[in-house]
């Protein structure tokens, strides 16, 4: 068994909310427009996204991406968080075949 530090991406809810609001305004949509496009009875879901309380579902992100003519990566903001994991070397190899800068997951012993 070995303990390693694993950096993984997580969604930054507040920054994602700011991104959604900024892109909405930049593209000339009101909250009511977005509410109507999604068929929501009330605008609270849109406000909840923009305040960083919730994130849209993947389906809704695809719609936002089309509406804003923007890649999802520009809508969803992520940050890296370090997590310690304990596992055997075969599991570590599945995460990272190369312990180098080119690796998707940065591991350190």
Image (cartoon, rainbow, N blue to C red):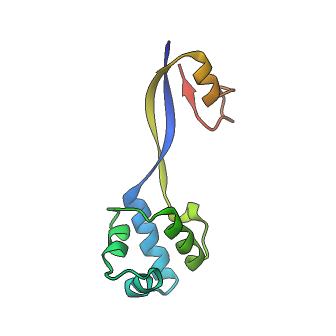
Which residue: 56% across, 27% down? 107
Q: Place residue 43 in its image quadrant.
A: bottom left
- 89 with respect to 57 (left or right): right
- The residue closer to the viewer here, 34 or 73, is 34
Q: Place residue 99 in its image quadrant.
A: top right
The percent position of residue 61, horizontal first and vertical second, equals: 52, 67
Which residue: 50% across, 81% down? 26
- 44 with respect to 3 (left or right): left
- The residue closer to the viewer here, 22 or 35, is 35
- The residue closer to the viewer here, 25 or 92, is 92
Q: Is residue 47 above or below residue 30?
A: above
Which residue: 45% across, 71% down? 20
Which residue: 47% across, 79% down? 24
| Count of marks, rendered view | 0
Q: Is residue 17 above or below residue 7?
A: below
The percent position of residue 23, horizontal first and vertical second, equals: 49, 75
């Amino acid at each position: 068994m070995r303990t390693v530090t694993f950096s993984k991406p997580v969604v930054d809810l507040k920054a994602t909310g700011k991104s959604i609001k900024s892109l909405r305004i930049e593209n000339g949509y009101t909250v009511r427009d977005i509410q109507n496009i999604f068929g929501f009875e009330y605008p609270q879901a849109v406000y909840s996204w923009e305040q960083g309380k919730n994130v849209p579902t993947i389906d809704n992100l695809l719609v936002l991406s089309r509406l804003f003519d923007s890649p999802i990566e520009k809508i969803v903001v992520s940050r890296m968080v370090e997590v310690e994991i304990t596992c055997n070397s075969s599991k570590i190899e599945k995460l990272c075949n190369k312990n180098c800068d080119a690796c998707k997951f940065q591991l350190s012993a």
